[in-house]
Amino acid sequence: MRSLVTAALAAVLLLSGCGKDEADVDESLRSSASQPFELGEAEGGTRPVTGHGIVLEVPEGWTAYDEQESADGTTYEWAVAEPDGDPAPAYVQFSMGMKGKGGAFEQLREGAKQLGALDEGFELLDEGEADVPGAERAEFLRFTHTQTFEGQDAVVEQLQVFVELPEGEVSTVRFIAPEGEWEDAMQDVYDSFVVAQSEEA
């Protein structure tokens, strides 16, 4: 399933200690912090996601949305998702920090917890350091909450990962699936997630 990411990365444990291990990724998959996201060609049932200094793999049937800048001009926003799902699709949503802009790494997890607490359906499941090869540091929140899809409410489980890239950009990647389906829909996607930043052109 991880044809473009080495077998060593496939063995990454979900929530073990964070390190700065260099990601062993083919140079063709590396990208600069400002390089837009792309979905690569399908191979072995998956497609690589590359851009903004990260790499991961998603099921080949997933679709991508148009990348945009955030309203405050501090992040690049993008998402890739399964085309449908009941009661909700599984998807990954990216908020990739622009160089010299955005919040400090230390504030991200606490800010997300405070925001989540405003939702009556929010339940914090776990938090701590995340193992993301190639990242300077990474932390996570894992929680359930309610989202609305096409007018219908659905409880989803979200693993929200905060990463600092080697050149200092701070980003958030959210792995989301219906409650009870996260491991089946999202575990392999998360396990393929690495930082593979190249220098700016």
Image (spheres, grey):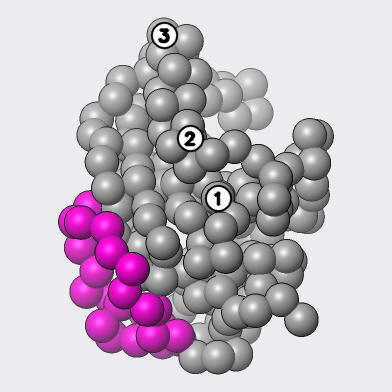
- Count all numbered tags in the image, as a single digit: 3
38 relative to 142 in the view: left or right = right
Q: CA distance from mark 2 to mark 1?
A: 9 Å
Q: Quadrant of residue 137?
A: bottom left
* Residue that mark 2 sits on: 108
- Which secondary structure dominates the residues rendered in magenta? loop
**Neighbour tally class for label 3: few under 14, some 14-19, many 20 plus, Cα within 10 Å:** few
41 in the magenta segment: no
Quarter of the image with the C terminus in it? bottom right
* Residue nearest the observer in this picture, 34 or 104: 104
Any mark on residue 170, and which? 1
**Secondary element at tag 2:** helix
Q: Residue at x 63, y 52 (%)?
A: 96
Quarter of the image with the N terminus in it? bottom left
Q: Quadrant of residue 132?
A: bottom left
User: From what the image shows, is residue 96 above or below residue 179?
Assistant: below
User: From what the image shows, is residue 110 above or below residue 101?
Assistant: above
Image: magenta residue range: 1-25
**Neighbour tally class for label 2: few under 14, some 14-19, many 20 plus, Cα within 10 Å:** some
Q: Residue at x 73, y 70 (%)?
A: 35
Q: Residue at x 49, y 19 (%)?
A: 115
Amino acid found under the numbered disc labelled 1: Val
Note whether residue 86 is visible: no
Q: Residue at x 59, y 29 (%)?
A: 149
- CB contact under 8 Å: marks 2 and 1: yes
Q: Earlier in the sequence, mark 2 or mark 1?
A: 2
Q: Quadrant of residue 18?
A: bottom left
**Secondary element at tag 3:** loop
Any mark on residue 120, and which? 3
- CB contact under 8 Å: marks 3 and 2: no
